[in-house]
Image (cartoon, rainbow, N blue to C red):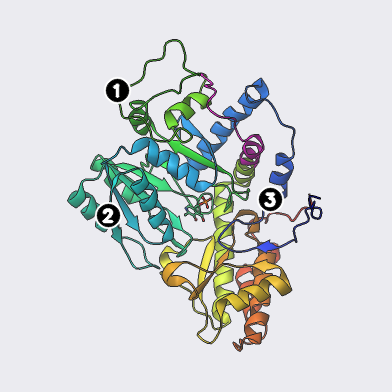
Amino acid sequence: MQMLYEDLNPPLRRLMGPGPVDVDPRVLRAMSMPMLGQFDPRFTEYMNEVMSLYRSIFQTSNQWTLMIDGTARAGIEAVMVSILEPGDKVLVPVFGRFGHLLTEIAGRCRAEVVTIETEWGTVFDPQQIEDAIVKHQPKVLACVQGDTSTTMAQPLEEVGRICRAHGVLCCVDATASITGMPLDTDNWQLDAVSAGLQKCLSGPPGIAPITFNDRFAERVQSRKHVEQGIRPDDYEASDGEIIQSNYFDLSMIMDYWSDARLNHHTEATSMLYAARECARIVLQEGWQTRFARHRQTSAALCAGLTAMDLQLFGDQSNKMPNVTGVYIPDAVTGDAVRTEMLDHFAIEIGTSFGPLHGKIWRIGTMGYGCRKDNVVSCLAALETCLRRHGHNARAGAGVDAALAVYGDPQQTIFSEPSIQSV
Ligand SMILES: Cc1ncc(COP(=O)(O)O)c(C=O)c1O
């Protein structure tokens, strides 16, 4: 007989790793709303609302602001495969694992990929990027904004301007940074930006918001081919090289999200509801409040960790405000502490990749999870687990230092997300 297993009942955790993070209960509620047919007028209205909301999230007036179904890398793949023709040259500044992901995806599009690298824990001076552009003359620059693997954020304002001046298309992966720190797509002259829900947007992984400008869209349209069976009567294939993926073909996806409503795929209805609610939550909070909350939480966490005689990882002047890297003390086994944090306190923190695996932990304070109660609970738990592994910080030092950063609760300049039950 087929085993039916038990009712689904996942344990309650505080997800304080580099993502996914706890989903805002408002988003969970939105996801439980009834299904609609994909061309139901109410559903297409929701699609248009999502486009409009995400124009604000990306700080853009780009018409082409839409969702790609799939996790954040689906957004990256859609951008890359739709713009890169075999043999095109791409420059990727790599400052962590996700720069390597951009390299990998561009390579699979059979582009010629050139990388520049900097030590993990640092970012590039824009001049280094300009020098590489001048030297290699790429068609596209693909760059991560915040690389969670190192907790570093690459300043992009100058980079976009440099790309524009050299006629290079600037494509950015803002998955880990979006709404935790400024991202000004139009003013920074970014041509395409992709993201995901599972970090500061406080949604589940599974849909990727993207935006791209007309300059980018024109190149995509020059490769337009519509699959047989859904071609409109006046269809004429373009002369350009066919986009190698059907699922991620932005030329067809644009027709799905425009009045043409090409029946390309079945939109991930519940994920669209989630994305809509995520954006509403961010915009209701307001940018200044939101950024201040992330900065203050990061400062409190860093103060607490330092007071526990731990050393922060990386160039602090370019640290992401929503994730913090901290060295694992020499005498301590990082994974054993993580396991105890989960077992005894139900708190998840992250390890890292490649050269940083086993060397640093990464602690996320993002969106809904960017709260004082998360910071102090995490510090208290870490102190206890570290003591059990021989690292003795002064009792209460971490929590006290964090609380000192928060100061008098009456003076708090913003309200934190409330912990609501669903
Ligand atoms: C900067 C960055 N880019 C891309 C990804 C990949 O996202 P996904 O796992 O949702 O495909 C992540 C995930 O952590 C990320 O942090």
> Amino acid type of disc 3?
Asp
> Amino acid type of disc 1?
Asp
Residue under the point 43% across and 68% down? 354
Residue 95 figure quarter: bottom left
Residue 10: numbered disc: none
Q: Name the residue under label 2.
A: 129
Q: Where is residue 20 in the image (x, y as percent from the top left)?
A: 60, 56
What count of labels does the image hold?
3
Under tag 3, what secondary structure? loop
Answer with left or right where residue 205 lies relative to residue 138: right
Compared with residue 263, is residue 10 higher up or lower down, i.e. above or below?
A: below
Farthest top residue? 233
- Whether residue 350 is visible, yes or no, is yes
Please say if the residues under marks 1 and 3 sit with CB atoms less than 8 Å apart.
Answer: no
> Amino acid type of disc 2?
Ile
Q: Where is residue 172 in the image (x, y as percent from the top left)?
A: 40, 47
Q: Does the magenta stretch include residue 265?
A: yes
Work out how far the residue at label 3 is from the one at label 2, CA to CA, in angstroms: 37 Å
Q: Name the residue under label 3.
A: 24
Under tag 1, what secondary structure? loop
The disc, 2 or 1, on the residue closer to the chain's N-terminal end is 2
The disc, 1 or 3, on the residue closer to the chain's N-terminal end is 3
Work out how far the residue at label 2 is from the one at label 1, CA to CA, in angstroms: 33 Å
Answer with left or right where residue 249 lies relative to residue 270: left
